[in-house]
Amino acid sequence: MGRKRTKSGKIRLAEVAELAGVSPITASRFFRNPEALSVAKRTRVESAAKELGYVPNLAARALASQRTEVIGVLIPSLTNNVFSDVLRGIYDASEGSRYSIQLSNTRYSILQEEKLLRLFLAQKPAGLIVTGIDQTAESRAMLEAADCPIVQIMEIGPNPVDMMIGFSHYDAARAAIAHLFAQGHRKIGFVGARMDPRVQRRLDGYVSAMKDAGLFEQRFVVTTATPTSVTLGGALFTDLLAREPDLDAVFCANDDLALGVLFECRRREIGVPEQIAIVGFNDLEFMASAVPTLTSIRTNRYEMGKTAATMLIEAIEGRRPEQPVLDLGFKVIERQSSSSRHSDNRPAVSGGGAANKMVALPSSHD
Amino acid sequence: MGRKRTKSGKIRLAEVAELAGVSPITASRFFRNPEALSVAKRTRVESAAKELGYVPNLAARALASQRTEVIGVLIPSLTNNVFSDVLRGIYDASEGSRYSIQLSNTRYSILQEEKLLRLFLAQKPAGLIVTGIDQTAESRAMLEAADCPIVQIMEIGPNPVDMMIGFSHYDAARAAIAHLFAQGHRKIGFVGARMDPRVQRRLDGYVSAMKDAGLFEQRFVVTTATPTSVTLGGALFTDLLAREPDLDAVFCANDDLALGVLFECRRREIGVPEQIAIVGFNDLEFMASAVPTLTSIRTNRYEMGKTAATMLIEAIEGRRPEQPVLDLGFKVIERQSSSSRHSDNRPAVSGGGAANKMVALPSSHD
DNA sequence: AGGAACGTTGACAGCGCTACCAGCAACGAC
DNA sequence: GTCGTTGCTGGTAGCGCTGTCAACGTTCCT
């Protein structure tokens, strides 16, 4: 049976080529590298494709060219609104490009990540975005052997596989504690949940800052492997208070926990910031409208996702960035919850790339 | 040049077949329908595949079989944590199945949705999940012509394209207002943002309930097309109060707005619920730990996503659900913010599927 | 015993596209 | 005028897999 067997409704490249009066190869070239065609043929193919409503068959293209136009993204969680901001950036950057996003969820397991990586790589993705820098040795080897650009996101560290974009969670935590010190706080608790590598590094930053000041006490730290939530913030804070009733500040590993701590303070009629100061992490939108407004560490999540995907696409197309490692920095957004004085807008402390990138961010976003 | 040109590292089905001592076709069948093989060959192919670390080439499979194993998902927003719950359900259900998820973001534009739909359908997805019931006529026609199962999610209505899973936003809003009436509230405001079709239906439910009681006033309603946020909740509530200082309750179209209203009340020292009752929508996690705890309408978002994907996969594999339209219902979760009495756990009012599973659609309009 | 029915297997021929290389015209250099 | 060079175009041959159908061996029935 001949090629004409296909349903009449189906438009193949051959049909476009025929209508345009060129060979299929020329038509194919039009979609991949229009500049290679003479202007005359280019316009002919273009209008033929439009007239027929041609949509390329991606599977055939992938099979023939031995590569796909898929960007694989591995993130640990979909629940977390931190990642939803990053993802939004990634999707926004991919829009308008020829690349599509294939998302997978590692559920904070590096073994699961390794499995997914193997799956992804077998399909020859155009590029890969992976979260963090704590891969298994096997994953690391696969990433290094992969013949596509790779961006690691969410944090920065030594030995990037390829490109890297993020900020130092350790430094950010130290900046938060430095801020609390500057406000006169000494007995500063730490509340953390999930304890993934990035939260762990925030804890490390907290510990080092406290030790540097000779103020560290193990009982100031309350953590759990449980996924984070507002309610959990209240519960962990309750534990913390039971261990150390004289606490004068709490640094929360994320904003949900901070909100939970705030509510718990309200429930117990503990004055914020008079009796206890609160600092969160991420600067989610609600932090600026809470009562009192909540101090947090602003991280550039949307920008991180967007830049990661943009860098990746550039690299895929052969334009590697001059700087493969990008520190997007962070910024201490000081608000009422940690302000011993009454001002709500004092000079912000920032770190990493933030210092010389986006200087004066307004204190609310989106 | 012969077939052996391929890099030695690449494992094709042919290699597996050779090692197993069967024909490629038999090996192929092993992956698609193992039951069709004799036990002996099945184990032979299985161990050969494992030994060689074979991973099928999806592009080749898609090209040869004229269908993909991709489930297309069209949602309006990635920011909204309502959708992130739904997505989590979808991804969870797809995990372990052979299907992968292809996500696209319509940004609340039905024209954008139409464009994406065209793109998706050209790749012959195995199935499709689309948000809502307000497609363009063109989209609707494409969906009806598509030869794959389709699930509409987030709400229910007449004339499903194929399958449908959601609940009545209209009825849910009416239940919220009925609850406020039962608590003795009369001057009930409505605060809404984004005003997508589902929020619009919540507004319609509010309006109809108020009109039924002869209490509707246009000035009780404050809405905006701006994307929702906690801060916006406070701002809209401020507008509302300016128009109607005697308000005794606010129904918020979502929980972020409700939280913003709560904070604004605290800022203005308005007692909740003594002076103003607050009811939100969705019952996000933080509602239960706010001070006071916030009443909301619980919607089964994760379950909706999970069930949608499960139904879809079942349908793809030929097992169509007995009931193509599933009403997941809702539940009024009464908490302190709307409780005139002091109890925090009175019998919950529920509607839709929660009461009588997927029978006739409850009194939804339009 | 003969034949039908079933379960299992394999040969063949593409799926729609692109990599590779050859061919051809137009042009400039010598 | 010949020869390369460049720019554009087309033919051939797959990419790795699966749909279709025929062929085979076995079992069961009459």
Image: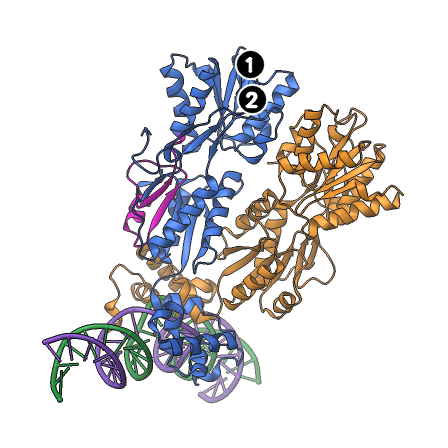
Chain colours: A orange, B blue, C green, D purple
Q: Position of residue A53 (x, y in %)?
A: 33, 55
Q: Is residue A268 above or below residue B158?
A: above
Residue B32: image quadrant is: bottom left
- Decide which of tag 1 and tag 2 comes sooner along the chain: 1
Q: Amino acid at mark 1?
A: Ala
- Residue A96 shown in magenta: no
Q: Residues within 10 Å of mark 2 (few under 14, many from 20)?
A: many
In this view, the residue in front, A81 or D1, is: A81
Q: Position of residue A133 (x, y in %)?
A: 68, 58
Instruction: Please report the residue visible at 62 percent of the width from the left and 51 percent of the height from the top.
Output: A307
Instruction: Please report the residue visible at 53 percent of the width from the left and 16 percent of the height from the top.
Output: B340
Q: Chain of mark 1?
A: B
Q: Position of residue B243 (x, y in %)?
A: 52, 13
User: Is B333 placed left or right of D13 in the picture?
Assistant: right
Instruction: Please report the residue visible at 38 percent of the width from the left and 28 percent of the height from the top.
Output: B170
Q: Chain of mark 2?
A: B
Which residue is tagged 2?
Answer: B337
Q: Secondary structure at mark 1?
A: helix
Residue B78 visible in the displayed image: yes
Instruction: Please report the residue visible at 50 percent of the width from the left and 60 percent of the height from the top.
Output: A70
